[in-house]
Image (cartoon, helix red, strand yellow):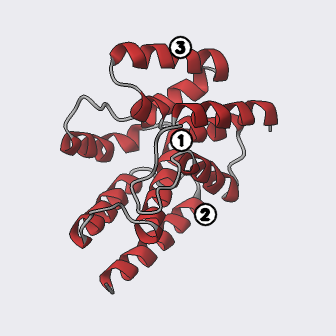
C-alpha cells in the first residue's frame, strides 16, 4: 500500500467534510464514515490502494458540491491528486443530487448491478456502515418505519452488488439481519 497517498486521501476527505457530522445524536464527525468504509473493506481482504482511496473519497463529490461547476472542479482535483481509477469509482457511487430522493434511490437499485467490481465492493461497505449507524447512532427524527425502510432499500441495492467478495457479502447479511432484529424488538 502507498501509505502517503492513503494519508493524503484521508486528509483531503477530512478537509472537504470538515463542517459535516453524521445524522445521529452523537454528532459524530462525518470523516469517520469514509474511514469506517475503508476499514470495512480492509477488514474483508480488500487492500487495493485505489479502492481504499475511493472509499475515503466516496462522498466528497456527492456531499460537498452544490452544482455542476463545483463537481467538475472537484473531479479535476481528484483526477490530478489520486488518478483516473479513483475518480471513476467515486463518480460511479455518487448520486446525482439534482434528482429527487426517491429517483436517486430507485437509480441505485437499478444501476448497482452495472457498476465495476470496485464500485460494488464500495457500495456494499458503505451500506454496511450506514446500517451500523442506524443501529448504534440512529439518525435524529427517523421513525422505526423509516429505519426499516432504509434497511429494505439497502438490501435491494446490495443484492445487485453481491458476488465480488463473499466475506463482505456475508458480513452485510449479518449486519442487516442483526440490525433488523434489533429494530423489530423496539
- In the rendered structure, find residue 67 and report the number of the disc placed on it: none
Task: Compute the Cα span from label 3 to label 1.
Answer: 23 Å
CB contact under 8 Å: marks 2 and 3: no
Task: Compute the Cα span from label 2 to label 3.
Answer: 34 Å
Q: Residue 16: horizontal and vertical position, in percent?
A: 53, 31
Left or right of 160, for residue 9: right
Choose mark 2 or mark 3, whichever is in front: 3
- Look at the picture and state if 44 lies above or below 106: below
Check disc 2 and report the residue beneath it.
167
Dot 3: few (<14), some (14–19), or many (≥20) neighbours within 10 Å? some
Task: Compute the Cα span from label 1 to label 2.
Answer: 14 Å
Q: Residue 56: horizontal and vertical position, in percent?
A: 60, 40
Q: Is residue 2 visible?
A: no
- In the rendered structure, find residue 76 and report the number of the disc placed on it: 3
- Look at the picture and state if 159 lies above or below 147: above
Dot 1: few (<14), some (14–19), or many (≥20) neighbours within 10 Å? some
Q: Within the image, what quadrant is residue 78 found in? A: top right
Check disc 1 and report the residue beneath it.
117
Say what secondary structure mark 2 lies in: helix
Left or right of 50, for residue 183: left
Quadrant of the drawing holding the N terminus: top right
Residue at left 49%, top 53%?
124
Q: Residue 158: horizontal and vertical position, in percent?
A: 41, 55
Q: Is residue 147 visible?
A: yes
Residue at left 72%, top 36%?
6
Amino acid at each position: 500500500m502507498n501509505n502517503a497517498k492513503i494519508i493524503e486521501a484521508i486528509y483531503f476527505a477530512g478537509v472537504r467534510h470538515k463542517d459535516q457530522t453524521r445524522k445521529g445524536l452523537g454528532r459524530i464527525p462525518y470523516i469517520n464514515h469514509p474511514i469506517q468504509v475503508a476499514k470495512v473493506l480492509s477488514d474483508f481482504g480488500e487492500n487495493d490502494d485505489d479502492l481504499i482511496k475511493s472509499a475515503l473519497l466516496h462522498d466528497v463529490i456527492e456531499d460537498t458540491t452544490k452544482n455542476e461547476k463545483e463537481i467538475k472542479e472537484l473531479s479535476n482535483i481528484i483526477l490530478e491528486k489520486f488518478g483516473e481509477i479513483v475518480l471513476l469509482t467515486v463518480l460511479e457511487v455518487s448520486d446525482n443530487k439534482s434528482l429527487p430522493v426517491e429517483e436517486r434511490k430507485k437509480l441505485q437499485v437499478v444501476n448497482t448491478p452495472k457498476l465495476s467490481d470496485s464500485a460494488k465492493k464500495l457500495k456494499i461497505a458503505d451500506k454496511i456502515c450506514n446500517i451500523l449507524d442506524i443501529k448504534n447512532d440512529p439518525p435524529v427524527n427517523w421513525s422505526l418505519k423509516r429505519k426499516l425502510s432504509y434497511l429494505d432499500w439497502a438490501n435491494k441495492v446490495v443484492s445487485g452488488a453481491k458476488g465480488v467478495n463473499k466475506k463482505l457479502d456475508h458480513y452485510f447479511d449479518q449486519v442487516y439481519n442483526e440490525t433488523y432484529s434489533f429494530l423489530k424488538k423496539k
